[in-house]
């Protein structure tokens, strides 16, 4: 029995990006491949605020891409809260890589289940993250950081 084939999302991603900037999808695909080089794994940020998943992993040509949704409350509260470090973000990315590659490597019927569960996890996190945000006092920290940045800009 052969291993299941992961659909290649390179052209779909290239077409989406190309439409936004007004170039051809084939040119965008070539640019994405060139930009990523020989890297097998890449993390990118996207903004899919309208009910989007907090993360997704795709196979795009030779590269697997972990997309983190900056528009989901998960991003600001769990992935990159005030005071977060590169090490903290790497821990979160490792966990999401394990989930995402498991989804990509699963047979088609299980990929559908993963996708459904990812949407459920995203909804649950969208509900829980603001509660956690308040509990940890992040809105106050963000306000203080924004005020400090405004003060720094005024002095410059």
Image (cartoon, grey):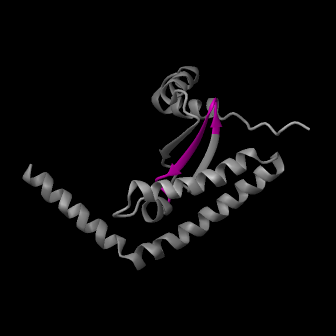
Q: Can residue 111 be seen in this snapshot?
A: yes
- How many discs appear? 0
Direction left: furthest residue: 155
Q: Which residues are magenta?
A: 59-72
Q: Is residue 148 left or right of residue 24?
A: left
* Most frequent secondary structure within the magenta stretch: strand
Q: Is residue 4 above or below residue 127?
A: above
Image location (x, y in percent) of residue 2: 87, 36
Direction front: furthest residue: 87
User: Which quarter of the rendering shows the N terminus?
Assistant: top right
Q: Is residue 64 above or below residue 144?
A: above
Image location (x, y in percent) of residue 139: 34, 71
x 42%, y 79%: residue: 135
Asked whether residue 71 is drawn in magenta, I would say yes
x 13%, y 59%: residue: 151
Q: Can residue 53 be seen in this snapshot?
A: no
Q: Quadrant of residue 141?
A: bottom left
Asked whether residue 110 is drawn in magenta, I would say no
Image location (x, y in percent) of residue 118: 66, 58
Quick one: 125 or 23, which is closer to the camera? Answer: 125
Direction bottom: furthest residue: 135
x 46%, y 75%: residue: 132
Q: Is residue 104 above or below residue 11?
A: below
């Amino acid at each position: 029995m052969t291993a299941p084939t992961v659909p290649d999302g390179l052209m779909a991603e290239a077409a989406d990006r190309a439409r936004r900037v007004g170039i051809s999808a084939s040119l965008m695909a070539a640019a994405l491949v060139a930009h990523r080089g020989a890297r097998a794994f890449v993390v990118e940020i996207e903004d899919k605020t309208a009910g989007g998943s907090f993360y997704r992993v795709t196979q795009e040509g030779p590269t697997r891409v972990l997309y983190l949704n900056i528009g989901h409350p998960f991003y600001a509260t769990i992935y990159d809260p005030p005071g977060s470090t590169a090490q903290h973000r790497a821990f979160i990315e490792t966990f999401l890589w394990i989930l995402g590659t498991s989804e990509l490597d699963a047979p088609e019927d299980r990929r559908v289940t993963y996708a459904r569960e990812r949407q459920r996890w995203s909804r649950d996190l969208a509900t829980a993250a603001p509660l956690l945000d308040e509990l940890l006092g992040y809105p106050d920290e963000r306000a203080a950081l924004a005020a400090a940045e405004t003060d720094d800009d005024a002095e410059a």
